[in-house]
Amino acid sequence: MPEKRDYYEVLGLQKGCSEDELKKAYRKLAKQYHPDLNPDNKEAEEKFKEVGEAYEVLSDPEKRSKYDQFGHAGVDPSYGAGAGGYGGGFGGFDDLGDIFENFFGGGFGGFGGSTRTRNPNGPIRGNDLRYNITIDFLEAAHGCQKEITIQRLEQCKTCKGSGAEAGTTPETCPDCKGSGQVRVSQRTPLGIIQSTKTCPKCNGKGRIIKSPCKDCNGMGRVRRTIKKTIDVPEGIDNGQAFSLRGEGDHGVNGGPAGDIIISVSVRRHQIFERDGYDIWCDIPVTFVQAALGDELTVPTIDGNVKYTMPEGTQPGTVFRLRNRGVKYTNGRGRGEQYVRVNIEVPTTLNGKQKDALREFDKLTSDKNYAKRKSFRDKIKDLFD
């Protein structure tokens, strides 16, 4: 078995990294090596699989814990089997439960159960597949449809998943009698002890295919590229994901199919900003509009609406448009839209305009400016 690289090294991370760091690294590398972006590139395809395998293990808390403790052997029992004098671990045993099972005929002190039988021909669920899409701000707010192209394992139509050539059927392995495991005797420092191992004749499958199906090479599944139109849910936000149930790899031995997990990236908008389900935007107004009040045309994610701004509106004032935000993804109702007023000062004035402003200034006093009057009173109190 070829030596596997450390999963943290594959993703360019350190042990103990956070979940967010893990997701960010996976998305970057999955996009970099995605087959759609690297057609006919075997090296990129292998790296894409390697990145997916590393993320599948490290994103699962239970698998990650085992991997951190035991390395690849903790998540793949067949990895490294037979290496060293006793095959690693406890003299070739899967764990301490094997030792106590052979000595005492069952579990001992919490080590394992009386037997650990696995049905190699039982139903096995297909793997989940992951896909990244990038959509516009308004597409995320309103929902949209996108077409994706993805590779998945599907049941071979020729052999209907059996792996055997038409007219033949798989045979029960004569060595393990279909269990996929055989007992072996092994000399250890504790003496000769029996242990259960994967059957070498059938590689743990419990059956032997003498005439493999030519279309799937006896695997029962074939990899196919499919195009699928997906519905992106309304209100989804940047960094969120949703699942297409039963659209992943097909299962084995009648097992259910996995899912396709779609991760979403949302492009920034030139006007709107999102805060949860609320929308924010800034709107520039003139000094005259703010002083006298005006009817404003305000953009929303549903189109323009009218809003009457009262006279004397101050810079930075925020007003609210109810139910103009994003629709809640898990319930009824919508967020709000908040509009922040920015009073714009003209940058170029001609002589006539300047004279008009100076005349206006002469006609006003502190009583027309509440904040300026308050500020001057504070200064007066401070220095007097």
Image: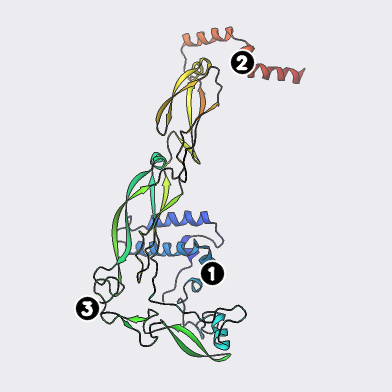
Pick whichever, 5 or 152, lies toward us: 152
> Which residue is identified by label 2?
369
Q: Residue at x 50, y 11 (%)?
A: 354
> Which residue is identified by label 3?
167
Can you give x and y, in whole percent of width and height, for residue 330 in the image?
47, 46
Q: Residues within 10 Å of mark 1 (few under 14, many from 20)?
A: some
Can you give x and y, in whole percent of width and height, for residue 255 in the image?
37, 68
Q: CA distance from mark 1 to mark 2?
A: 69 Å
In the image, what residue type sits under mark 3? Gly
Q: Residue at x 47, y 44 (%)?
A: 331
Q: Given this view, does label 3 or label 1 mark the residue nearer the observer?
A: 3
> Which residue is identified by label 1?
66
Can you give x and y, in whole percent of width and height, for residue 359 in the image?
54, 7
Quarter of the C terminus within the rendering: top right
Can you give x and y, in whole percent of width and height, for residue 178 in the image?
38, 82
Lower position in the chain sequence, tag 1 or tag 2: 1
Quarter of the N terminus within the rendering: bottom left
In the image, what residue type sits under mark 2? Tyr
Q: CA distance from mark 3 to mark 2?
A: 95 Å
In this view, 38 is above or below 138: below
Q: CA distance from mark 3 to mark 1?
A: 44 Å
Determine which quarter of the picture holds residue 100.
bottom right
Determine which quarter of the picture holds residue 166.
bottom left
